[in-house]
Image (cartoon, rainbow, N blue to C red):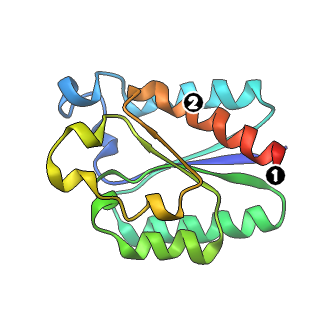
Amino acid sequence: MASVLVLNGPNLNLLGTRKPEVYGSTSLADVEEMCRQEAGKLGLDVDFRQSNHEGQLIDWIHECGRAMKAGDCIGAVYNPGAHTHTSVALHDAIEGAEVTVIELHISNVHAREEFRHHSFISPVARGIVVGFGVLGYPLAIQGLHQLTRTA
C-alpha cells in the first residue's frame, strides 16, 4: 500500500496549547488520527512526523523523494511552520528530491503579520491549503491523492 508523508515543522508539537485562538485546541495527536482516517478512506498509509529541527525535516524530505521514485509514497503534506518564511534549505530539499508537496497552514497566514506573507516553500509546492484550521490536513491529503491519480 502506498503512503503519504505528513510532515510538521517547528512548534507544531505545541498544537492544542499554543495560541489556541489562532491554531485551535486540537492536539497534534488528534491531527494524526484525522490524517490516518482520511488516508485510510483513500487506501493509503500515513507516515506522520514532526520535528523542530530543519536538518531532520530535510532528511525526511530526501527520504520521501526516494520513496516516491520507488512507488512507495505519493508525496507529502507539509506544514513547515515558521520555516515557511525562512528556509531556502527546505525549498532546495523539496526541489532537489523532486517531492510532490502540498503546503499546509492551519491559519490564514496572509491575514497575519507581514513577515508571514512570504513562503520559500510555495514555489516548489504543487498546491497550498491555507486557513481551514486542522481540517486542512484531510483536505490536503485528498488533494494530493487526486493530483497523483491524474498525473
Q: Position of residue 67 (x, y in %)?
A: 74, 63
Res. 125 image quadrant: bottom right
Name the residue located 75 percent from the left edge and 54 percent from the top edge. 73
45 up-or-down from 126: above or below: above
**Residue that label 1 marks:** 151
Left or right: residue 145 versus residue 62 is right
SS of the residue under disc 2? helix
Asked if residue 2 shows in the view, the reply is no
Asked if residue 101 shows in the view, the reply is yes
133 up-or-down from 6: above or below: above
Name the residue located 33 percent from the left edge and 42 percent from the top edge. 13
**Residue that label 2 marks:** 139
SS of the residue under disc 1? loop
Q: Position of residue 130 (x, y in %)?
A: 41, 37
Q: Which mark lies nearer to you, 2 or 1?
A: 1
* Residue type at numbered disc 2: Leu
